[in-house]
Image (spheres, rainbow, N blue to C red):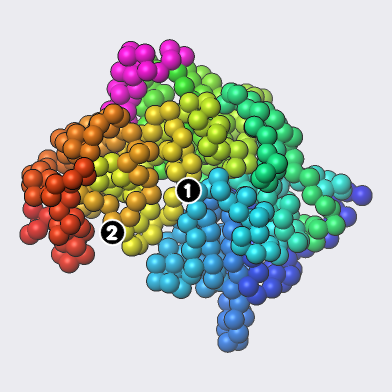
Amino acid sequence: MSRDNFPRLSAEEAAELIPHDCLIGFSGFTSAGAAKAVPLALAERAKRIHAKGEPFTVRVLTGASTGEDLDEALASANAISWRAPYQSSKTLRKQLNSGEVEFVDMHLSHLPQAVLEGFFGQMGFAVVEATDVTPDGRVYLSTSVGASPTWLEYADKIIIELNSAHSPRLAEMMDIASIPLPPHRNPIPLFHSMGRMGVPFVSVDPSKIVGVVKTDQLDDGTEFAAPDVQSSKIADHIVEFLVKEMKLGNIPKDFLPIQSGVGNIGNAFMKGLGEASQIPPFYMFSEVIQDSQLDMLESGKLLGASTSAIAVSQAKLRDLYEKMDYFTPKIVLRPQEISNNPGIVRRLGVITTNTALEVDLYGHANSTHVAGMKMMNGIGGSGDFTRNAYISIYMCPSTAKGGKISTIVPMCPHVDHNEHSVQIVVTEQGVADLRGKSPSQRATLLIENCAHPDYRPYLRDYIASAGPGHIRHNLERAFELHVNLMKTGAMLPNGG
């Protein structure tokens, strides 16, 4: 029996198998390894059913965000009723903020266990992209692992998208292992970023595979723009801080593993780290590899990278596939419950860098909700890493929207990472090292080192007007900047 003995389906035939209100686990951690053909066909099926005046929606789980062919296509077809744990689709964002779609924002390391414990109900289908599937049920994943092993284990039925555009040698990078449910857990035997403990495939019951859909399409990975002035200044400040920490002996001479969040600022930081001669070659223990990290692996500045996804531009992915002999020993792809595992992050002493929408005067960070109400994308893996970091760093520009918004505010109307976890805050203005500082000291550092000069007088006046307490606030003014923004479009009264 070969893989062709599994039922061969078109994407449309596969979509027809999925019932209304089905919980589906799709592969994908960012656009890397995301299912493509079946969700597009499912979106078209939903449109046809809706045109008849009949209901059709599904509940969607993925590892993290996905590509245009999944979240955006299904949301545009009004085919999603419930979504977890993270998203980055413009259309879906509007729907969940309007209440049309129910959204559960979750720490990514928590997701697999929550599914296996049955917290979200039974999963009808797993739709997973792979480079190969064998007669005995070995599934070889593509450019991400994410939560796909959990979907393949837990789902009643499985549809495999067999994508010939990806290199089958990705299997050489895979280290797939499962963690037993409590209370039957042992310590995870990983003691180095590049350590291995698993196998290169996911084993499933072949009788659950109801069809194979053949595809030939690369991931629609983001190609980041060259770092802008703000991002470059932020990167320079972080590199300077890390060099200082090394000189003080707070970071070993051979350095520590780095985690970097997804996005332009994170990409700029990694580029700056790669160009800093004072920083020795180092490893990454992170959840995503971006373009800059492939460049650093090739230059030798990055010695190796542990991740859950290769989320790079198509040009970089083609380059990687042409140089697999070089890259395969330098990249390890893991399930997200391991790549984001708090115990391993703490054990390895990972230095974490993530972005925030805003940070308040006492070090609480909001990375998800604009004005405390409108969801952007989700918490993702930032909390997994921040809470357990050797040094946790948060990055953001000091202002947004042409200066109409300050990212340093009196009080965050939504908190994702509290003052006990946020250690370092960096904007293009400078660095606030909050370690060992009292609340009043943190406020002074954040105002003088990180806030934009246009907002410093307001923030100083706010502190002066605050009532007594260990953490001082003026509750009548705590959200004044946010209220001004909603009323006038700018945080400062009268625009400044």
Rounded to the nearest angstrom, the CA distance separating label 1 from label 2 is 19 Å
Q: Residue at x 69, y 73 (%)?
A: 19
Q: Residue at x 34, y 51 (%)?
A: 415
**Disc number for residue 380:** 1
Which residue, given by chain and number where applicable, does mark 2 sit on?
A: 371
Magenta span includes 127: no
> Is there any visible trace of residue 49 in the rendered image?
yes
- Picture coordinates of residue 182 (x, y %)? 66, 45
> Amino acid type of disc 1?
Gly
Instruction: Give the number of callouts.
Output: 2
Q: Position of residue 403 (x, y in %)?
A: 18, 49
At a point 66% along the width and 55% down the height, the residue shown is 117
Residue reaching furthest right?
Answer: 1
- Magenta region: 231-254
Displayed quadrant of residue 95: bottom left
Relative placement, left or right, of 22 versus 439 is: right
Instruction: Inspect this view and state whether residue 216 appears.
Output: no
Provide the secondary structure element on which disc 1 rests.
loop
> Magenta part mainly helix, strand or loop?
helix
Label 2: few (<14), some or many (≥20) within 10 Å?
some
Residue type at mark 2 is: Ala
In reply to whether residue 248 is colored magenta, the answer given is yes
